[in-house]
Amino acid sequence: MNGALNAIVPMACVTAAGIAAMVAESFRDPGERMPIAGLGAVGLIGAAFATILLWNHNSSSFGLVSADNFGLFVTGTLIVLGLLSLAISGPTIERERLPGGEYYALMLFATAGMMLMATATDLLVIFLALEVMSLAVYVLTGIRRDSPASTEAAFKYFLLGAFSSAFFLYGIAFTYGLAGTTRLDKIGHFMAAQAMSPTLMQMLALGLLIVGFAFKVAAVPFHMWTPDAYEGAPPAVTAFMSTGVKAAAFAAFVRVFLSAFEPMRGNWSDVVWVLAAATMIVGTVAGVTQSSVKRMLAYSSIGHGGYLLVALVSGNEFGKGAVLFYLLTYAITNIGAFGVIALLDSADRPNDQVKDYAGLWNDHPVLAALMTIFLLSLGGFPPMAGFIAKWYVFSAAVRAGYTGLAIIGVLTSVISVFFYLRIVVQMYMTPSDVPAQFPAVPKVAAAALVVSAILIFYLGILPTRVLDLAAASISTIF
Amino acid sequence: MSFPILTSIVALPVVGAFLLLLVKGDEERSAPLVRNIALMVSVLVFAETLLLWARFNAASSDFQFVERHAWMPAFGIEYFVGVDGISLLLLVLTAFLTPLALLGSWESVHKQTKAFSIFVLLLESAMMGVFISLDLFLFYIFWDAMLVPMYFLIGIWGYDRRIYASIKFMLYTMAGSVLMLLAILGLAYLHYTATGGYSFDLLKLYDLQIDLHLQFWFFLAFALAFAIKVPLFPFHTWLPDAHVEAPTAGSVILAGVMLKMGTYGLVRFAFPLFPEAAAYFAPALAVLAVVGIIYGALVAMVQPDMKKLVAYSSVSHLGFVVLGITAMNTQGVSGAVYQMLSHGISTGGLFLIVGMLSDRRHTRQIVEYGGLKKITPHLVAAFLIITLASIGLPGLNGFVGEFLILLGAFRWDPRLAAFAATGVILSATYMLWMFQRVNYGPVTNEKNATLSDLQPREWVVIVPVIAVAVLMGVLPNLFLRPIEPSVERMLNHYHQAVATRVQANRERPASDAPLARRRQP
């Protein structure tokens, strides 16, 4: 034992918890209540300890998985959002009569896949992680088996996801054909040698990988699956996948493009620039026209993907740090917003239209206040975390000389405020015409949302420590 | 280490807001307690600002009561606050108007009193934060944070079209300010390229040599944000909506303090940071200001709604302030700062009076009134004094500022002063005409016959306003003394920067002119 396995300890903890959840489910009598979510929480907390212990050690397993600070920062983000997702899932499972063990097991497996994706340093392992994550999330999307909308969403998501995986795999194949390896560091050396006059094969490999990643991070024009999948899935699952999948995919995107393909920056930066601009614009403009809150937030998260792409294409120290900080704040905020949706969702009334939120302030003042905090943070208002995150992204863009992107970014964030405010208007300023039917709020879930809100203020007012962590994380690998 | 008085001033309302969160109970029982706590907190803040004024060294032009702590050291962001003569009095004005705004809506706010008081206190805190920030990042945080409570105040407690007005207010002001955020980032980056370290420290950025081409862009970004806030013609369209729909407290704070943020921003940031660009654009801004003065006055004249009339009169009065600033001489800028305070007092007072009338009759239409003089003599007397103050009658506050501004403008360009002076006459026309229609003549509407005169609470609200209006008219030096050294320092810096690079100034604008025209409306 010389620590060769150290780097995979966090995901091993989570996987073990997932297996335990499955076993527990098989021993559960129908109708019996079991604290399966607690098992998951134990696994995640174990993973958190492992992450803290691994910090700064830069350990690597088999040369395929590297627990460097960058990967660990994303792992930490995933642990936080895993815990929050577990906490807000309870009411959904109860109400929809979902099989709890399977649900939690899938969520944990998906989390393990995401962690692997964030720490993998080999294209094939990234692909493996992508599939582990994606398969679990496809099933979670369709877990309401008797709901046509859920099934349709899962099917769409699966087909397009499989399609994009094929692109990604094709890209890996071309890269392997060129460089003779799938290890990122070796690919980096090869690309550096060839960067001056890239061959057609190189460009093909690059293009296919971009398409594969763009699907996963829901960049325009590869975003079509997102609104349907987010709308059809149970809201707790949407909370989880809108944040986790994005975080993991962006971590891998950054790692592959800012290390292995960094020498070819001149060939991909323009493409990513266009993707970023299109994603910000389409995400926000389409969000304005939505009447369903879930779809609105789906477009909003597409838009936020655009800001992350801005940070990615900026590529400087600030950009890399901004990706990490943005992912963390976006994950906490979005999970909070979808968490509120999940709590308001009741079996006989989905409460999904914007107008269903009328009068929420009178019935659930705390939930309304929390939702407001999440929405304002998404809109980028100080002193919430969203402001610091956006500021970080725009500083990166200004520093890299992408002033145009920064201008598009700030203007789209003003437009996005319009649709976030539509929900606020309903909650505070419109009396409800029908008697409100909001379900009671379970304590654990409410506590999770309060914790998210506190984190948002913490990251918005005293971000120094986390900013420094993010900055320290990027210096280890790039 | 001395007591951090500025931080305590900004933090106190937030603490008060948290205190209010703890008050439990239904609306009926908790409302009086909530109102009293909020009022006490705001009075305490006012007392603290008076203490600050008393301890302020008026002879010095430096920033005083400075507090400085590292906040995000990796990015050169600091918690850096301080006041000079310009911001000191605006701080006092904010703290003066907030308790009055709370008292003024004592009986007109019936629902969710707790949330209302919390938002007013948070707003006060953010506004004072804007005035004391000497770090651009900190400034921007307060600047943006201020929008949220105001949005809720208009949107929840406003009148019929409140939702439209609140969203318009929010989007307009945000659209203006986000480009300023980019300019701030650009400035910090320039500081990095010049010195190797990021900084948002205003005093360091003042000394930065900025390429003329960039100055133009940065100045336009800053000026757009401030022009929307002022609001300078033609960026004023959000103002009448916001004012008319806002509750009394919202209008008082909006007109009394928030509009000054725009002009304060021009004095503190846009002009001294980018002197050459400012010198280049000053004539254009001055023309817009004069257009605003006349346009605002003419539109005010035909308004059937008292609140809308006062709102347009603000467009006109703030035009004077901008004109004074663009003149960039001692009289003009001192007069502009003085007029900011004075406009806060007189327009705040007008909105309070209109609020009192509207509490009684639930309408703000001028035709609904008439002959009030016989029914509510005290109220009408107060109304008259504040109307005259707003017009600029010598001996009251409005005169000093307008006189100094016109003097400054005349020294710069007599034509501008000549046109602007018509605004003084026009303001007498629309204000007195409104006053006449509301208060004189026979009582045409019998609903007015039973209106009650000033309540004790309303005496408490209106007497301080009148007292300050008289004080500012009779003893202007009391207020000008702290203002002038700071204004002088700013002007020295500005003229030096313009003079040293006057040659470059002469050559470059030719090539930059098309760019500048494109952004001009």
Image (spheres, helix red, strand yellow):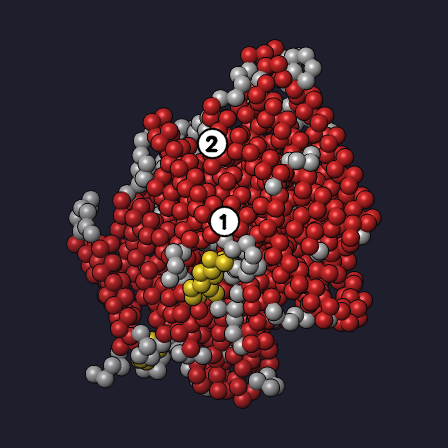
Give the quarter of the image for residue B40: top left
Amino acid bearing label 2: Leu
Residue A349 visible here? no
Residue type at the position of mark 1: Trp
- Residue at 59% across, 26% down: B382
Q: Examine the image and state in which quarter residue B267 appears.
A: bottom right
Q: Residue at x 66, y 55 (%)?
A: B223
Front residue of B283/B166: it is B283
Q: What SS does tag 2 mark?
A: helix
The x, y position of residue A465, in whole percent, is 37, 66
Quadrant into which the N terminus of chain B falls: bottom left
CB under 8 Å between callouts 1 and 2?
no
Give the image location of residue B286, x and y in percent. 75, 51
- Residue A44 position in % (x across, y down): 27, 62
**Separation of residues labelled 1 and 2 (CA atoms):** 24 Å
- Do dots 1 and 2 share one subunit? yes
In this rendering, would A456 be left or right of B380? left
Vertical position of residue B212 compared to residue B456: above or below: below
Q: Is A311 placed left or right of B335 in the picture?
A: left
Q: Residue pushed farthest bottom?
A: A193
Q: Chain of mark 2?
A: B
Give the residue drawn at x 36%, y 74%. Answer: A69
